[in-house]
Image (spheres, helix red, strand yellow):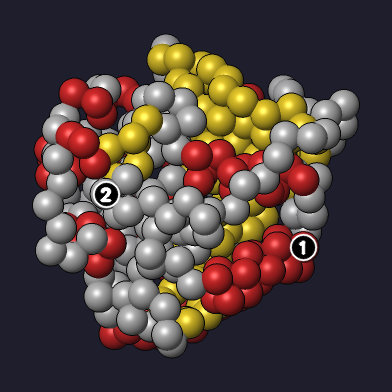
Amino acid sequence: MLKPEVDSLVPGQTFDRRGFVKTALGSAFAAAALPVMAQQAIKTDFAGLNAGEVSIPSGGFSMPAYRAQPEGKKNLPVVLVVSEIFGVHEYIADVCRRFAKLGYLAIAPELFARQGDPESFGTIQELQREIIAKVPDAQVMGDLDAAVAWAGANGGDVSRLAITGFCWGGRITWLYAAHSQRLKAGVAWYGQLSPEPTPIKPKNPIDLVGQLHAPVLGLYGGKDTGIPLEQVERMKTALASSSDPDARRSRFIVYPESGHAFHADYRPSYREADARDGWQKCLDWFRQHGVA
């Protein structure tokens, strides 16, 4: 299911163990072979923040997560941040800190933790086969619910709940909008809309347009080879023709000159102008729908 998405990230590249780096949590990894563009990567400081790893109980499992929130403040709007297939690494942690600087409690759960240690696998193909493909959507929905419950007990106001996700997390954003009745708004960055279903991933965003509990803003690249514009147009048509009011309130913005992962500031795919515009559109969307 993920092959087109991975190919659009790293067309023609071969990965080996030397290409992987540890993440903020040490329980998943990003592909440094992409390669990391250190000079352009945004680095958000910790001043005024309570940020770092936390442990969240979920279905008898202790799930690691990265949390960032303003120090000494309560009743904060909550945003779930869902990673790419590479897990909760420094880029995702930095996104959490960016939200926290704006007054959010941002939390990024390590949604692959149950499936094993990514460092046990030497190639991205093994990672995809042995971990990513084995993560059930139902498990992810439950883990996100657990993250929301944790946030509510630790300074968050879960009546003002949002979600945003990148790549793999973009698809999850659409799914969570059809799952959670608490959600106010979602922003999906270049998430798959209609990949091939599997027994543990039976539904896709295009199957769920009539079940949304919150409006979703989709931010996509016009040159994304893994998510053709035809898929985006099909999704837009399905949303517009749905009887679900939150589907009809959902919107897409397509950046014509960007490909996949244009917000990922640690990779060559980064397009600063579109990433900054998308970030502002994300913040505006959350404000417009009562999160901030």
Q: Residues within 10 Å of mark 2 (few under 14, many from 20)?
A: some
Residue 216 visible within the image:
yes
Q: Position of residue 95 (x, y in %)?
A: 59, 48
Specify whether 246 is left or right of 194: right
- The image shows residue 203, relative to residue 100, as above or below, that is below
In the image, residue 215 above or below residue 225: above
Residue at (44% x, 45% y) in the render: 83
Q: Nearer the viewer, residue 229 or 21?
A: 21
Residue name at image x 50 percent, y 39 percent: 90
Residue nearer the viewer, 79 or 183: 79
**Residue 33: which numbered mark, if any?**
2
Residue 246: in sight, yes or no? no
> Is the residue under label 2 in contact with that under label 1 (CB below 8 Å)?
no
Of tags 1 and 2, which is closer to the observer? 2
**Left-right relation of 222 to 103:** left
Q: Quadrant of residue 151?
A: top right
What quarter of the picture does the C terminus occupy?
bottom right
Could you say which is closer to the camera, residue 270 or residue 5?
Answer: 270
Q: Quarter of the image containing the N terminus?
A: bottom left
x and y, in percent, of residue 222 in the image: 38, 83
Say which amino acid is labelled 2: Ala
Q: Quadrant of residue 260?
A: bottom left
Q: Residue at x 48, y 82 (%)?
A: 255
Residue at the disc numbered 1: 287
Question: Residue 13 at what x, y percent from top left?
Answer: 15, 58
Q: Position of residue 127 (x, y in %)?
A: 19, 38
Q: Mark 2: which secondary structure?
A: loop
Please name the residue shown 77% across and 63% down the image: 287
User: Element under label 1?
Assistant: helix
Q: How many marks?
A: 2
